[in-house]
Amino acid sequence: MLSASVLSACNGHTDSVVKENQQTAIKNSVKKNESVNLPINIYKDSDYKIEGQKVTFYRKIINVEMKDFDESSELDFLDRYDNYVRNKNFNLKDDFKLLTINMKHEINEKARREPYEGFLLNKGSGLVIGNTELASENDFLEYQQTYIATDYRVKETSDEKGDVLLAIPKEYAKDKNLQLKIVQKIDGANKIVYIDLN
């Protein structure tokens, strides 16, 4: 009787080990998308007009950086977003990593500086692990991705350099397959490119 219960306990342990190994295998089988090197143009408009003068306007990502939140970056992040984010009372320092996407605007010839579009990502851009769009699993990520890809919510600027901020839940941030999927819009033609974040 004792040996039967020991055998049963061993089988239970074996089953849980097998289950754990299967889950690990599934996680490790995520196919990482081929990534591009930075800097990269994500937007180009050859018919952009500044004071009636036609120029070619570029928006590019220079680099990306992921780090822990501190007091200063937490305040900066909350200032960027509307009251919806403040009202959620997220613990950014404990539960999230800060992704900073450094960007640049360029024009191909001299024109008097005048405010143009803010720093933003093209619609459809967002965080992925393999083929999984993380916004489909996390409402807060979905909100952020919509916010930073919606031109009317972003202040116009004449600054050449700026950045976009995203708070990424730590469970995703530590995944070695985490990537930023970018919709690259070159003179109206769309293409998907991926940037490694880990």
Image: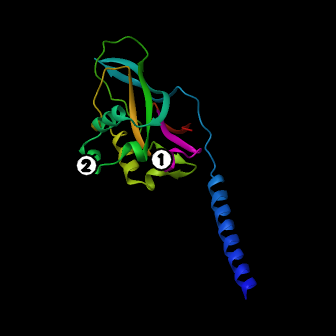
- Residue 12: x and y in percent read 67, 75
**Residue in the picture at 29% in, 50% down:** 88
- Asked which secondary structure carries label 2, the reply is helix
User: In the depicted view, which residue is nearer to us: 78 or 16?
Assistant: 16
Q: Which residue is mark 1?
A: 170
Does 46 appear above or below 177? above
Is 126 contained in the magenta span? no
Residue segment shown in magenta: 170-185
User: In the depicted view, which residue is nearer to us: 56 or 155?
Assistant: 155
**Residue in the picture at 26% in, 42% down:** 82
- Residue 14: x and y in percent read 70, 70
Q: Which mark is residue 133?
A: none
Looking at the image, tell me whether mark 2 or mark 1 is earlier in sequence order. Answer: 2
Q: Number of numbered discs present?
A: 2
Q: Which residue is mark 2?
A: 87
27 left or right of 64 in image? right
Q: Amino acid at mark 1?
A: Lys
Image quadrant holding the C terminus, namely: top right
The residue sitting at the right extreme is: 3
188 left or right of 33 in image? left
41 left or right of 83 in image? right
